[in-house]
Image (cartoon, grey):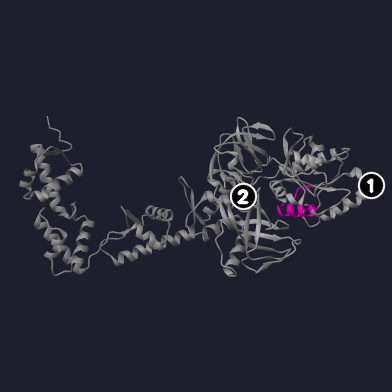
Amino acid sequence: MRHVIIGTAGHVDHGKTALIRALTGIETDRLKEEQERGLSIELGFAYFDLPDGSRAGIVDVPGHERFIRNMLSGAYGMDVVLLVVDAKEGVQEQTLEHLEILDLLGISTGILVMTKIDLVTAEELAESTEMAQEMLAGTALEGAPTVQVSAETEEGVDRLKQAIVDRVTAVAGKESRNGIPRLYVDRIFTMPGFGAVVTGTLIDGSIHREQRLMILPQGRDIRVRGIQVHNRPAEEAHAGQRTALNLSGITTEEIRRGDVLCTIGLSRVTDNVDVSLHVLSSFPRMLEHWTRLRFYLGTSEAFCRAILLVDEAVLPGDTAQIQLRLEKPILTFRGDRLIVRDFASQYTVGGGTVINPFAPRHKRFAKATAHTLNQWNMADDVGVINLLLAQRSELCLSEDSLRYYLSHPNSTLEKILKALEREHKITRWNGGSRLIAARDRLQRAQTNLISALEGFHAETPLAPGQNTAQLRLQLDLDETAFEKIVGDLIRQRRVVKDGNLLRLASHQIQFSEQEEAIKEKVEAVFLDAGINVPNIKALTEQLPEYSAQSVRETFYALVNLGQLVKIADDFFVHIRTFENTMNLLTGFLQEKTVITVAEFREFAQTSRKYAVPFLEYCDGRGFTIREGNHRRLRKSPQKSS
């Protein structure tokens, strides 16, 4: 069951505030200036008690053209609108502009309310009602029920209450959007002993007491100390409720109308959005490229530039996919409704929906740009996922980021992803941050990685593998994608990772005829030397018939094959020498218990230059332990009884 917000709209002095007072007994003009002038300036708030005991919030918007921004702030989040027309004055300029705004915002559930019927004759009422109903033709409110009332005599008020109940019940049965809570701030004040309080209509989801939220654009982490819903304390607020939040961690001086409270995990802002924009027929000129506009979303206002990508201009009455480049970052989701007005705030230019909240900068008049914009405009849920996975530079995408594009509860989104997974269209990884990738892009990246390793092995057959950092840069992959691809290939036993080296599982070091000859001579040198071995420079000098590079490459290939064991920097011994020496050392310690460097030098027939690093190698591997000038086995053998 959704909670519902009722709003008013209509020309100044057509009786909106008096109508709310007649319905609820609440005076929404709270400012002294409003009461003295009889003119609504700020948004007014009340509530309407429903038969089941619950309350629907009411937002009363100002009708004067000078306060159109306040009207826009109040209209966002309306579920049911009372479009008010004075029966005596009939349809006026702001009536039409408010109706256009409601239509652009997609508010399709409403009631046409003819007010001040006590001031007109039956004939005048019939005429003005007919004209008002004709005004709704072709709009989202076409066919809305009409109720005629007098706030002064209360004639028709009961009929209006029942009509409201009927409309609210119909809207409340609809499924809410995506469950991601957003509250656009429309009032800020301080309560003694409590601190900063903000109010707004909660769009989607819920907020609970003690929850931590992000306030944008400040990017501040705040805590909800307390909640009121329709003037009642509450532990939790739900979508469609007028909500007051007592905030901890910020002062009223740091908050502005238009700021938005949202969940910390979904607080990424943008200043470049692709939109589908309808320019009103009433706008007196065409919309041209680079026109500076006022952008409205929620209660926020920002200046922006219209980037016309396909045509030089958009004519009044036409709809086009364009880009809006904002002068300050905003939080928005695909499908959000927006309004744009001219820079001087004289006219409503038009409105529409966000089709890509994180749009790249496109090349104007390019066929590819037109195609991309049309794809985004026409895409269904699966199409949006495909576009994201195909067009983003990153191979892997966080599943959480899909929430900026798909207006569904978690359960619905999960069904879509599982279906795509079953169809082998996507690959998903679990973990701290759930990731997703297009299966075809992933397979291409895996193929490219395998091909790169094949090429590396062909060029350097003696190398044990390619450096992972170099390979990632060569493939132009981000770290996350590279890690996931390599992990999958390791699980498939197609590649092997050894430290920071990666190789094909099938790769074996292969020696050419010359390298085989070098290999045999190197091994012979090291076997003859025992542990009194030459370093790499001396080795190349002992084999002058071969290039130094060929000797070094073959030498390190033997190291990688395990035929030469690294004892210390520039000190390697042959594996057979190493094993023999270790056996001698083990036998000595089993018999004598401890050994000195001099004793090791004697039985190994070597010098201190080699004896010390060899014994330190044994210490470092945990084979021996040093105690003063002696060493013993770390685990002494048990004596037999």
Identify the disc placed on residue 278.
Answer: none
Q: Name the residue under label 2.
A: 407
Q: Name the residue under label 1.
A: 121
Q: Mark 1 or 2 closer to N-term? A: 1
Q: How many labels does the image show?
A: 2
Kindly indicate the quadrant of the structure image that contains residue 597: top left
Q: Residue, x 94% and y 47% (percent of image)?
A: 122
Disc 1 from disc 2: Cα separation = 49 Å
Kindly indicate the quadrant of the structure image that contains residue 291: bottom right
| Residue interval drawn in magenta | 94-110
Residue 249 picture location, percent across and down: 54, 37
Q: Residue, x 14% and y 50% (percent of image)?
A: 578
- Front position in the image: 17 or 410: 17
Residue 530 picture location, percent across and down: 10, 54
Main SS of residues in magenta: helix
Binning the other alpha carbons within 10 Å of mark 2 as few (below 14), some (14 to 19) or many (20 upward) gives many
The mark lying in front, picked from 1 and 2, is: 1
Q: Is residue 238 left or right of residue 420?
A: right
Residue 610 picture location, percent across and down: 11, 50
Kindly indicate the quadrant of the structure image that contains residue 6: top right
Q: In this view, does 568 lie to the left or right of 495?
A: left
Q: Which quadrant, please, contains the N terminus? A: top right
